[in-house]
Image (cartoon, rainbow, N blue to C red):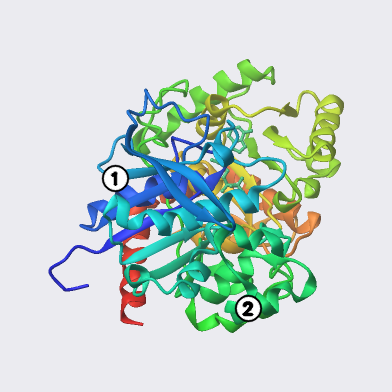
């Protein structure tokens, strides 16, 4: 790329918000692309055309029909559509391959490896057709992790200099499948050493391939990048990722600071900003009313909004927590075991805990705005959004020191002294409370410290809340770091 030319990036992803969203991946791609565009790059997105995407409301236009993409021994008919990502200038290409993506769901119960391998191959195949020559393909998660393999094994002039960045959003979702699937992407284990080694155990692991073959790799927080090379966090791939240690980086995700904004949030009971934080109390009272909790504006409300999964440490929340002087509000769905655990506690202590077993964005916003404290006792956390959203709403997080939680929450240095008196340093820059070990007692103590400051030192508490609200979690700074990483790739 010459200096005068714009850097051209193609983001390849299975999910892009608001077109198709299952989890955080969609938000990241949908936010980072416009942020990069604002940094004077030519960033575009490519994704599958799922049956659920409303062509009319997103103004999709078909630009190419009946392109025959070779896949193993067959030809697969593909159409290409284009649109502009809402509220941006980012162009999105859609690969319309009904055979694989006709259904409404992004992920099906089976066949995902084959579907996304075809998508990955089709991306490279259609580049000359859409007439876009990216400098870098930015691959997200295991779905598109075989793009570097395809580039390396295809002797095509137009992709010869194409570079890749592979972003790992969660190291545990690896995309393992039978090696026969490789032919869908016209891949052959004999052509690439990393593939021939990988399939020796009887399956091919897309994550392994992305890690071994991308030009550079990153995770969604600096701490998670350091953690995954250890056996505790490496999900069985610590030795593999260690090989790329020098090419592995961590960039903290941002949040959509327009959507998550207590001054403009249409869902919350009463809007507020850093100068009117006391209006959080009005929100609190309204939430207590809505959820049937005793109304008391002075009582600390402690919230948890999350997928109910092993990763999130829901099980560290025990009966003992209900002895604390506060009200708990839970919102989440997931594993039956954790749902029942929280429901049982709510039945036993109806005045102290409200269990909301559902997915509800509106209620989530109300809870972020109304609570005093937000819990994230995660076993591991690649980045985590909840703690950043809660800080934006002046709700102080209590987190386990792991991954993105460690990188985004600065704990108050507080120690327990005699006679239930705590000692703590002035909360000059503190934005929360944290604990180290995956341990219910440590978690309990961290929350207890937070409650101590909340009830006994309102001025310090207000200071911490303001520190939280002052933090800049917009995508602008993350986008700048991605830009640096792209530049590093081009120099390689
Ligand atoms: P993960 O992506 O691992 O699930 P994150 O903290 O990165 O966790 O992001 C979770 C996002 O989903 C947050 O924005 C959180 O508010 C939201 N969320 C989780 N559960 C619910 C729910 N039941 N209702 C509404 N929003 C939810």
Alpha carbon separation for disc pair 1 and 2: 38 Å
Q: Is residue 408 visible?
A: yes
Residue carrying label 2: 190
Q: Residue at x 47, y 38 (%)?
A: 49
Looking at the rendered image, the quarter that the N terminus falls into is bottom left
Can you say whether 218 is above or below 341 in the image?
Answer: below
Which percent across, then down, holds residue 151? 45, 70
Say whether mark 2 is within 8 Å of ligand 1.
Answer: no
State how many labels appear.
Answer: 2
Can you say whether 300 is above or below 396 in the image?
Answer: above
373 on left or right of 9: right
Which percent across, then down, holds residue 189? 64, 74
Residue carrying label 1: 90
Query: Which residue is at the front of the view, 294 or 377?
Result: 377
Query: Which residue is at the front of the view, 52 or 316?
Result: 52
Query: Which residue is at the front of the view, 425 or 31?
Result: 31
Q: Residue at x 32, y 68 (%)?
A: 158
Q: Residues within 10 Å of mark 2 (few under 14, many from 20)?
A: few
Task: Examine the image and state in which quarter residue 84 appears.
Answer: top left
């Amino acid at each position: 790329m010459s200096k005068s030319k714009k850097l051209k990036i193609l983001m390849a992803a299975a999910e892009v918000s608001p077109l198709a969203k299952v989890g955080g991946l969609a938000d990241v791609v949908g936010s980072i692309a416009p942020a990069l565009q604002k940094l004077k790059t030519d960033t575009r997105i490519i994704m599958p055309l799922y049956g659920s995407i409303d062509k009319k409301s997103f103004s999709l236009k078909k630009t190419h029909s009946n392109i025959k993409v070779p896949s193993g021994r067959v030809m697969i008919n593909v159409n290409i559509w284009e649109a502009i990502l809402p509220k941006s200038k980012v162009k999105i290409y859609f690969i319309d391959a009904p055979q694989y993506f006709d259904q409404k769901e992004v992920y099906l119960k089976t066949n995902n490896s084959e579907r996304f391998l075809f998508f990955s191959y089709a991306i490279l195949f259609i580049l000359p057709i859409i007439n876009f020559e990216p400098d870098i393909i930015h691959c997200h998660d295991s779905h598109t992790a075989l793009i570097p393999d395809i580039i390396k094994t295809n002797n095509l002039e137009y992709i010869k200099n194409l570079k890749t960045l592979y972003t790992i959003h969660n190291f545990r979702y690896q995309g393992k499948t039978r090696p026969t699937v490789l032919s869908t992407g016209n891949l052959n284990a004999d052509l690439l050493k990393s593939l021939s080694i990988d399939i020796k155990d009887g399956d091919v692991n897309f994550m392994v391939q992305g890690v071994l073959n991308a030009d550079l790799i990153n995770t969604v927080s600096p701490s998670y990048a350091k953690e995954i090379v250890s056996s505790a966090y490496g999900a069985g791939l610590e030795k593999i990722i260690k090989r790329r240690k020098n090419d592995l980086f961590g960039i903290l995700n941002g949040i959509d600071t327009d959507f998550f904004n207590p001054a403009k949030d249409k869902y919350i009971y009463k809007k507020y900003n850093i100068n009117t934080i006391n209006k959080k109390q009005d929100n609190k009272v309204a939430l207590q009313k809505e959820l049937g909790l005793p109304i008391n504006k002075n009582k600390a409300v402690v919230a948890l909004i999350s997928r109910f999964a092993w990763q999130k440490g829901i099980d560290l929340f025990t009966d003992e927590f209900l002895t604390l002087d506060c009200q708990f509000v839970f919102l989440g769905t997931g594993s039956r075991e954790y749902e029942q655990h929280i429901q049982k506690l709510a039945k036993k202590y109806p005045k102290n805990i409200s269990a909301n077993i559902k997915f509800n964005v509106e209620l989530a916003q109300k809870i972020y705005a109304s609570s005093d404290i937000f819990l994230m006792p995660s076993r591991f956390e690649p980045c985590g959004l909840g703690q950043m959203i809660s800080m934006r709403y002046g709700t102080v997080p209590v987190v386990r020191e792991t991954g993105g939680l460690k990188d985004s929450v600065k704990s108050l240095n507080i120690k327990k002294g005699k006679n239930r008196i705590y000692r703590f340093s002035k909360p000059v820059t503190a934005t929360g409370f944290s604990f180290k070990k995956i341990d219910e007692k440590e978690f309990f103590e961290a929350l207890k410290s937070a409650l101590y400051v909340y009830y006994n030192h309102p001025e310090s508490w207000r200071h911490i809340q303001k520190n939280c609200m002052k933090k800049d979690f917009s995508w602008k700074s993350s986008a700048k770091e991605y830009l640096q990483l792209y530049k590093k790739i081009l120099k390689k």
